[in-house]
Image (tube, grey):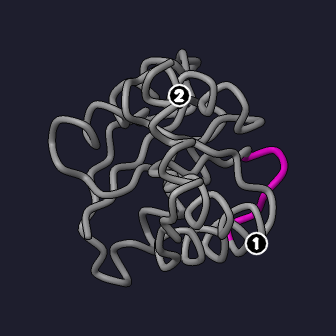
C-alpha cells in the first residue's frame, strides 16, 4: 500500500507527526509538501495528492489544513478523487464502505495525532462494501 500526504501551513505540524508514525511503521509514503509553517495555498497540495493517486498509483491520500474543509473541497475537484473530512471513527469507516473514498482529510485545529492515526487506520483497513446502490452512486459522482 502506498500513501501520499500533503498539507498547507496550518496542517504542517500534524503532517510531520503522521510522517514520523509512517517511518516508525515502515509505511510506503510520499510527502508532497508543504515543508514549513510559512503561509501556502491548500488547493496546490490537494491537487498534488489527487494527481498522485490518479496518475502515479498511490492507493490513498491524506490532506491536512486548519479545518479539513478546504482541502476536502479542493481534492474533490480532481477527477476520480473522493475525499472526506473524517471527524469520527464512523465517518472514516463509512467513507470507505459506502463511498470508496480514497482521500482522508483532517482539520489540524480540531484533531490530535492519536485521533488522526486512529481514523487513518480505520480508513485504510476498511474495504469498499460494493453492491449495486453504492456502485451506481459512485458512477453518478464520476459523471458530474
Q: Specify whether 50 is left or right of 56.
A: right
Q: Specify whether 96 is left or right of 110.
A: left
x then y, percent, for residue 24: 37, 82
Residue nearer the viewer, 117 or 87: 87
Which residue in the protein does label 2 denote?
Answer: 76
Q: Is residue 21 above or below residue 66?
A: below
Q: Which residues are magenta?
A: 108-113
Residue nearer the viewer, 29 or 33: 29
Instruction: Quarter of the image for the N terminus: give it.
Output: bottom left
Label 1's element? helix
Instruction: Please report the residue visible at 25 percent of the width from the left and 63 percent of the height from the top.
Output: 2
Distance of label 2 from label 1 (alpha carbons): 21 Å
x then y, percent, for residue 141: 52, 31
Residue nearer the viewer, 103 or 17: 103
Q: Specify whether 79 is left or right of 14.
A: left
x then y, percent, for residue 72: 62, 33
Is residue 110 rendered magenta in the image? yes
Instruction: Please report the residue visible at 54 percent of the width from the left and 15 percent of the height from the top.
Output: 41
Amino acid at each position: 500500500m502506498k500513501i501520499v500526504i500533503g498539507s498547507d501551513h496550518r496542517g504542517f505540524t500534524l503532517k510531520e507527526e503522521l510522517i514520523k508514525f509512517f517511518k516508525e511503521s515502515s509505511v510506503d509514503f510520499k510527502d508532497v509538501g508543504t515543508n514549513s509553517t510559512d503561509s501556502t495555498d491548500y488547493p496546490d497540495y490537494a491537487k498534488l495528492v489527487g494527481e498522485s493517486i490518479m496518475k502515479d498509483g498511490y492507493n490513498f491520500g491524506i490532506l491536512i489544513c486548519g479545518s479539513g474543509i478546504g482541502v476536502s473541497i479542493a481534492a474533490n475537484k480532481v477527477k476520480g478523487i473522493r475525499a472526506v473530512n473524517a471527524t469520527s471513527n464512523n465517518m472514516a469507516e463509512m467513507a470507505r464502505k459506502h463511498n470508496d473514498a480514497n482521500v482522508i482529510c483532517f482539520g489540524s485545529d480540531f484533531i490530535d495525532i492519536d485521533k488522526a492515526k486512529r481514523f487513518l487506520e480505520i480508513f485504510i483497513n476498511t474495504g469498499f462494501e460494493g453492491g449495486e446502490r453504492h456502485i451506481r452512486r459512485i458512477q453518478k459522482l464520476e459523471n458530474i
